[in-house]
Amino acid sequence: MILSGEKCKNLTNEPEGKANPLLDQYLTTRDLEIRNQLVLHYSYIAKTVALQMRGISSNYAQLEDIVNQGIITLIDCIEKFDPCKEVKFESYAFMRIRGSIIDFIRKQDWLPRRVRKTAKDISAAYEKLSSQLMREPNTHELAEYLDISVDVIYKHYGEMTRSVMLSFESLLDNTINNIFSLEKCNDGQELPESGIFQEEMKKVLVEAIDSLTDRERMVVTLYYYENLKLSEISKVLEVSESRVCQIHSKAIIKMKTRIESYMKG
């Protein structure tokens, strides 16, 4: 049972005086009209996550479908939110909505098995060559290792874009949840290792981004921070959309390899 506001101060973990009174009221009364107001108020979270992930979902579902999935999860977040865990509602909802959309996309199985296998093979080859060479392998080295031509590698990059993106989003989701789970223990006290883990993850992400070429970094920035579609990025860079897919896939593989290496210790 969720504790009342009297037993659990500052329900949304916001600075004093900035907590959402509607959330406090709903947790006490469970009034459906109040819940509807909260859904409307926080619907921007579902829309924001859907926009950030539209590059993965656009091959299967309309943006509206993804937003609806986010809203369904948002309602569940409001129902199950426990303020005594001292986590901001926005942070809690963002992580759960992001995870639910990833799961929703996975269940659609819109990627051919061949493309999934290719993505896995290239990622594995990239990781192994990075370890052997003690540096990032170039496209020619990857092609030679896999015994295929460079042109075929580029073709695969274009095909596997969404597969790599989904895999990377899943990795980030798991990483965020790991940090989240370490932030507080059961009695609400901060665990000493949580700060160390967060700082190390920030360092790994920075190193992953720094490992990219200027063009790769530009594509990642335009896609993840400016929320541009791959077709829009192609116009900015004055290259074909397939070329943007290739650049994006290679960038994501680099970052994914870095993060996975860290997570594996």
Image (cartoon, rainbow, N blue to C red):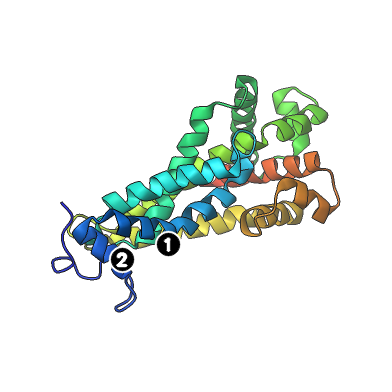
Helix, strand or loop at mark 1: helix
Residue at the image position 53 percent from the left and 42 percent from the top: 66
Residue 121 horizontal side relative to residue 214, left or right = left
Q: What is the x, y in percent for residue 68? A: 49, 44
**Local secondary structure at mark 2:** helix
Location of the C terminus (image quadrant): top left
Q: Residue 114: in sight, yes or no?
A: yes
**Residue furthest bottom in the image:** 17
| Nearer-N-terminus badge (2/1) | 2
Expressed as whole percent of the image width and height from the top left, the position of residue 146 reads 70, 25
Q: Is residue 84 left or right of residue 239?
A: left
What residue is rendered at 31% in x and 60% in y? 34
Task: Residue at 59% x, 31% y: name it.
Answer: 124
Q: What residue is disc 1 on?
A: 41
Q: Where is residue 28 drawn, in percent x and y?
A: 19, 61
Q: Residue sitting at 34 percent across and 50 percent down?
A: 77
Amino acid marked by disc 1:
His
Number of marks present in the image shown: 2
Residue 113 screen position, x and y as percent: 60, 20
Q: Is residue 28 above or below residue 69?
A: below
Viewer-closest of 137 and 224 = 224
| 60 w.r.t. 11: above or below | above
Query: Would residue 204 appear left or right of 134 to someone viewing this image?
Result: left
| CB contact under 8 Å: marks 2 and 1 | yes
Which residue is more in the foreground, 73 or 218?
73
* Amino acid of disc 2: Leu
Left or right: where 140 falls relative to 52? right
Which residue is the site of mark 2?
Answer: 22
